[in-house]
């Protein structure tokens, strides 16, 4: 058993599948003295790997100050803390507010990245989000609901780039999403894919178009824990066409590791 330094480790647990945590994150979870986890989103099978003597607590019933007080008390007592978040903590993880208070208290912390639900969803769909000559940009955002977004990040403006867009926390706002994308010039037949609870045993996938997004989500009963991916990179027919090849493996393309061969040589 590895002894961890007494500090707070903010660990990304991955999207749901207990095997989709990093080796480093898993080692911290297995050796931490206090495990505080997002119980509504993190797989219990993963939390069960904590050492038997660890104190394991759920964070859903605590406010921010209660969580930070617990973590600070533990670290000052010479204990290590695994603060376990779903997916990758950097994406809608609400970790900045924790870090601010930890720093004010003089308590050290370290962030351990995890597999984000956006990439788990792409994997579940068998999709590449950046397709040569189709789109080379992915925008990660959410629709504006009760929590506002900055004025320069309105969905209509972001959608005007016509690249792949990944929407977190937006399943209940599907109608608004459609309105904003259409206003940005997207066609009604633009492919959209929705993955609910990516990598969990009850994972659900809905493939649709922009025009049918709201109706299909309603029919599937999807209102939460869903990733919406939109854009022509989500066209399932792409895998049936020998197009959009990258330059990286083009035999005529020269780069630092291989000299390209021209046709006829």
Image (tube, helix red, strand yellow):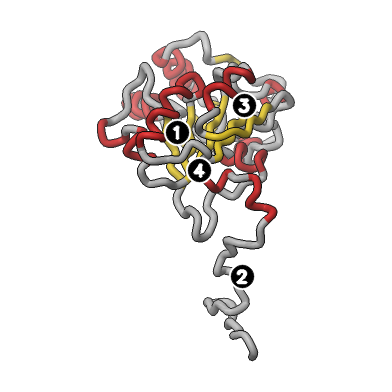
Would you call the spot at circle 2 few (<14 residues within 10 Å), some (14-19), or many (20 or more)? few
Quarter assignment of residue 213: top right
Give SS at disc 3.
strand
Verify CB contact (< 8 Å) between mark 1 and mark 4: no
Q: Which mark is residue 231?
A: 4
Q: Residue 200 or 106: which is nearer the viewer?
A: 200
Tell me which numbered mark, 4 or 3, is placed earlier along the sequence. 3
| Residue that badge 2 annotates | 249
User: Which residue is at 64% across, 89% downward?
Assistant: 264
User: Which residue is at 35% across, 24% downward?
Assistant: 101
Tell me which numbered mark, 2 or 1, is placed earlier along the sequence. 1
Q: Residue 210 or 95: which is nearer the viewer?
A: 210
**Figure check: 46 above or below 21:** above
Give SS at disc 1.
strand
Q: Residue 111 or 254: which is nearer the viewer?
A: 254
In three-dimensional space, the C-alpha distance between marks 1 and 4, rounded to whole angstroms, equals 38 Å
| Residue that badge 3 annotates | 196
Q: How many numbered marks, from 0 up?
A: 4
| Residue that badge 1 annotates | 109
């Amino acid at each position: 058993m590895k002894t961890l330094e007494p500090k707070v480790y903010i660990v990304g647990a991955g999207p749901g599948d207990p095997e989709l945590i990093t080796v480093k994150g898993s080692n911290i979870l297995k050796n931490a003295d206090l495990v505080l986890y997002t119980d509504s989103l993190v797989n219990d099978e993963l939390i069960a790997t904590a050492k038997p003597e660890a104190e394991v607590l759920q964070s859903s019933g605590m406010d921010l100050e209660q969580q930070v007080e617990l973590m600070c008390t533990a670290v000052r007592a010479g204990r290590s803390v695994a603060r376990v978040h779903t997916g990758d903590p950097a994406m809608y993880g609400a970790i900045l507010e924790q870090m601010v208070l930890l720093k004010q208290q003089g308590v050290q912390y370290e962030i351990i990245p995890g597999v984000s639900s956006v990439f788990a969803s792409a994997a579940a769909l068998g999709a590449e989000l950046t397709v040569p000559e189709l789109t080379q940009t992915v925008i990660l955002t959410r629709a504006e609901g009760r929590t506002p977004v900055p004025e320069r990040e309105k969905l209509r403006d972001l959608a005007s780039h016509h690249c792949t867009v990944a929407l977190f926390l937006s399943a209940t706002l599907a109608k608004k999403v459609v309105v904003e994308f259409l206003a940005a010039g997207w066609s009604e037949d633009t492919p959209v894919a929705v993955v609910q609870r990516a990598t969990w045993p009850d994972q659900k996938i809905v493939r649709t178009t922009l025009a049918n997004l709201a109706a299909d989500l309603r029919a599937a009963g999807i209102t939460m824990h869903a990733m919406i991916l939109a854009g022509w990179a989500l066209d399932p027919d792409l895998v049936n066409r020998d197009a959009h090849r990258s330059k990286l493996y083009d035999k005529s393309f020269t780069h630092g590791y291989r000299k390209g061969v021209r046709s006829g040589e």
